[in-house]
Image: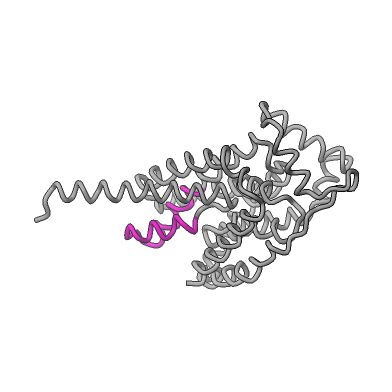
Amino acid sequence: MASPYLARASSLARGAFTVASGGFAGSVSAVTGLGGAVVFIPALSKLGYEARHIVGTAVVAVTGATAAGSFAYAQNGVSDVPVAVTVGCVGAACTPIGQLMAKRLSGKTLRKMLGGALILCSPSAMLKKHQQDADEGRDAKADWKIKRERPPPTNTYEVVRNQFLDRHDKYGGWIEALSAEREMLALGAACGLLQGTVGVGGGVLVSAYLTGMTDMEVHRICGTALLATVLTNVAVSAAHFRNGNVKSKSAVLLAGSAMACSYLVAKNISLQIPEEHVKQFIIVALISSGVSMLK
């Protein structure tokens, strides 16, 4: 018969491991713009949970990490909120369709396809060109250095409102703005279908696309990708709660530590990391995510 002291020590060790894993995942999420599932899923596997509990609990923890990190990036004015809202709303709407597809298609096959695609597209991050500033003759990296030296905005609401108004004025209306960003609508649909079908991977898809296919600055990609996946993560988390796939205690420990570290790192550290290093972190995270999905 096991000693109650050993059982207590084992419980404390599991709790400490869970909290540490959540903190590490939240930090990775803040630096790379990915949700942190690449850390959450192996950690939950070590705890001996069933596959459905691993995915359900991981999604809840990812939701906390992305929400906290995206809020910190928005406070610093380093996220494209209109793009994130467009992708997130379309993704949340498409999530139920993905859940229906999951009943007809093999989730394992889809995971392998996504894993291979992530590995193949990861080098695109290093080929990303800097956007030129036509008016002042400097690239986006130099312009970003100037912006980063300014004090952080004190009113997040004003920053977000101005982003929406700028988008409205640029295209001459809200409908025109949506029509001009059809790629983001398609990205949101793909993100929602993936989240609904596989359960995770939406943040990886958004980050990979923005890194390889747009001129968006790398730090802004991180903030935008985190915010874009919050809504889809909430929708998927609700479904997992309804189906009893969430281990509440582990979810609270993981999400709590992940939220704290994601916010603190995104708020105080991420913007101090050079752009090239962030690209390298993203590439490593994409490859790691791809390899984990191929298994």
Decide which of 260, 180 is in the foreground and name it.
260
Type of colouring: one colour
Where does residue 22 sit, x and y in percent of width and height?
A: 43, 48
* Residue at left offset 60%, top offset 62%: 283
- Write the start and end of the magenta stretch as one range: 37-62
Where does residue 122 sit, x and y in percent of width and height?
A: 64, 66
> Which of the 4 image quadrants contains residue 227?
top right
Where does residue 155 sit, x and y in percent of width and height?
A: 67, 26
> Which of the 4 image quadrants contains residue 119?
bottom right
Count up the numbered dots.
Answer: 0
Q: Is residue 142 left or right of residue 91?
A: right
Locate the N terminus by quadrant: bottom left
Where does residue 30 sit, x and y in percent of width and height?
A: 56, 47
Q: Is residue 127 left or right of residue 175?
A: left
> Which of the 4 image quadrants contains residue 207?
bottom right
**Magenta span: chief secondary structure:** helix
Decide which of 47, 200 is in the foreground and name it.
47
Decide which of 228, 178 is in the foreground and name it.
228
* Residue at left offset 18%, top offset 50%: 7
- Furthest-top residue in this view: 154
Residue 42 belongs to magenta span: yes
| Above or below 196: residue 120 | below
Residue 49 belongs to magenta span: yes
